[in-house]
Image (cartoon, rainbow, N blue to C red):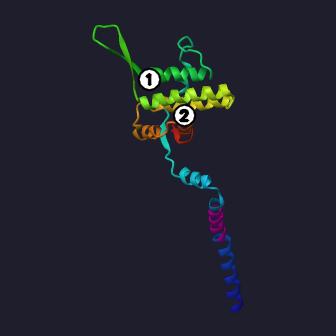
Amino acid sequence: MPHKNKSSMKLVLLLLILFVLPPVSKVNSQNALVINSPEETRKSVATASKLPVFEFRTSLTEQQIRELSSELIENHDLGEMVSKKFYLLDSKYTYEVALIPGNPQSKTMVRKPVIYDSVYKIEKYLKKSVKKGEMSVENATTIMNKVLDVANCILTVDTGNFEKEIDQRKDPQALTQLFMNQVKLVN
């Protein structure tokens, strides 16, 4: 009987070692990595876990984009698809209001100007980055397509918290990071 006790105790000890210690050591090694990292790394690790993620439903379809006539679209440095998405953005977000009834003069109004202006700020930043050689045209095109997809999908939903987040980011690079890394489009 004592022999059975020793073998069961060995089994329990072995199971303990296999299942309890690896997760603990993994957590400790991650903590050690953060503790031994420079101050900036610790800050980025801490803030990365706190960044909000905004989830919006996708309403833009490839068919809507394909149906746009090329005659309506102006050429864009980042390609035809970006050009078509900008056309959709402008047609959805802007509208004309008569200054005085009966007068042909009108004023262009913008729905959700915080979002609309941030898209154009990002576009300007991307074009400048490509021109300076800091970014490839392909990379800038991918980013601009995602930003436009987000903007074109969120016009009719509540974006109050997202707009507050945009307001906190004056830098176009930070705005780009927001659209690329903190927005998830779902079907």
Q: Between marks 2 and 1, how big is the CA–CA gap? A: 23 Å
On whether residue 26 falls in the magenta region, the answer is yes
Element on which disc 2 rests: helix
Residue 98 coordinates in the image, percent (x, y): 32, 14
Read off the residue under disc 2: 172
- Label 2 Cα neighbours within 10 Å, binned few <14 / some 14-19 / many ≥20: some
Residue 59 appears in the figure: no
Dominant secondary structure, magenta: helix
Residue 79 coordinates in the image, percent (x, y): 62, 21
In the picture as drawn, the residue positioned furthest to the bottom comes out as 2
Answer above or below: position of 10 versus 91.
Answer: below
- Label 1 Cα neighbours within 10 Å, binned few <14 / some 14-19 / many ≥20: some
* Range of residues picked out in magenta: 21-32
- Position of the N terminus, as image quadrant, is bottom right
Answer above or below: position of 186 versus 144.
Answer: below
Residue 126 appears in the figure: yes
Answer above or below: position of 86 versus 26.
Answer: above
Which dot marks residue 71?
none
Residue 27 coordinates in the image, percent (x, y): 62, 64
Residue at 51% across, 51% down: 50
Query: Nearest the camera: 23 or 102?
Result: 102
Query: Nearest the camera: 93 or 21?
Result: 93
Read off the residue under disc 1: 92
Element on which disc 1 rests: helix
In the picture as drawn, the residue positioned furthest to the front comes out as 39
